[in-house]
Amino acid sequence: MTSYDVFAKFYDEIIGNKSSRVSFLQKLIEENTPNASNLLEIACGTGTLIQGLSKKYRVAGFDLSSGMVGEAREKLPGVDIRIGNMADFDFGESFDVVLCVYDSINHLLSWGQWCALLANAHKHLNPGGLFIFDIHTPERHEWLIGSPPRSRPIGDDHMFMAASREGDKFKWTLRVFQKEDDGRFSLHEDFIYETAFPIEDVEHEVSKLFTVKKIVDDRGLDEGNPDWRPFFVCVKK
C-alpha cells in the first residue's frame, strides 16, 4: 500500500477548502503563460486543484497512490488521470503548464530523485512552457517539528497530525479516528516521510533546465518567516 492510500477518502476533509490555492496558481499561470490551454499536475492527489483549474484549461494528472487516483477519477470523470511515479513516469504528451505543488517534491527522499523530477517536468513541457513547484525548506521542516500537533474534528471523525524527525528524515504521523455506526471509533494511521534541501541548491539545479522568473510564497510570507514555503515559477529553456 502506497502512502496516502489509507487517507485518500479523508484527504479533502483534512486539507480543507482549496479555492484560494486554485486562484493563486491560476493567477501565476495567467501572468506568465497567458495563452496556455492545457495543464498537467504531477502528484495530483485527489484532483481538487485540477478540478478548479479545469474551468479554464484542459487538465490531466498522475499520482503514485492508487487510492488518491481513484478519488480524483470519481471527481473528474472523463479526465485523463493515471498512476505513476513523479520522478520518472512518462505521460506520453507535452503540456503548456506543469504543476508539482504543495510539497509533493519533498516526498522524494534523495537528491537524485529531486533532479529526476525536475528533468521529468522539463520533458513534459512544450517549448517555453511554465513549470510551477514549491518546496518545504529545511527551515520549515524544523519549524513544523517544533510546532504543536494538529488535532480537529472532520465531521463525526477526528484527525490528528504531528511532525517529527526520524533519522535524517522528516515524518508526518497521520491518524483519523473514524466513527462507526455503533458509536465506536476505528483508527486509520499512516506515516508520511519527506526530506528537504537548501533552497540555494534547488535553485542552482532548476536553473540548468529552466529560467526562474520568480520565487513567491502563496500567502505573501517572506524568506525570514519560518513558515515560508517558496513557489518556483519557471519557464522551460
Image: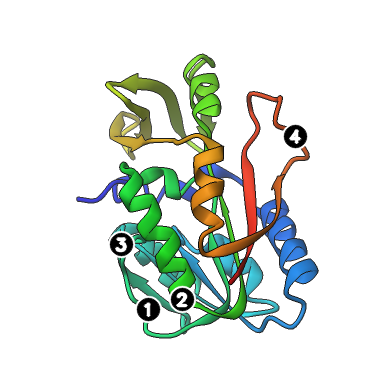
Residues under labels 3 and 1: Cα distance? 11 Å
Q: Earlier in the sequence, mark 3 or mark 2?
A: 3
Disc 3: which residue: 85
Where is residue 206 drawn, in percent x and y? 53, 55
Q: Earlier in the sequence, mark 2 or mark 4?
A: 2
Residues under labels 3 and 4: Cα distance? 31 Å
> Mark 1: which amino acid?
Phe
Disc 2: which residue: 124
Disc 4: which residue: 221
Q: Nearer the viewer, mark 2 or mark 4?
A: 2
Determine whether 99 is above or below 181 in the image.
Answer: below
CB under 8 Å between discs 3 and 1:
no
Q: Which residue shows up at 48% across the image and 70% down it?
A: 122
- Where residue 234 sits, quadrant-wise, is bottom right
CB under 8 Å between discs 1 and 2:
yes
Q: Which residue shows up at 35% across the image and 31% down it?
A: 183
Structural crowding at the residue carrying mark 3, measured as other residues with C-alpha within 10 Å and reported as few (<14), some (14–19) or many (≥20): some
Return the mark for residue 121. none
> Mark 3: which amino acid?
Asn
Q: Is residue 174 left or right of residue 210?
A: left
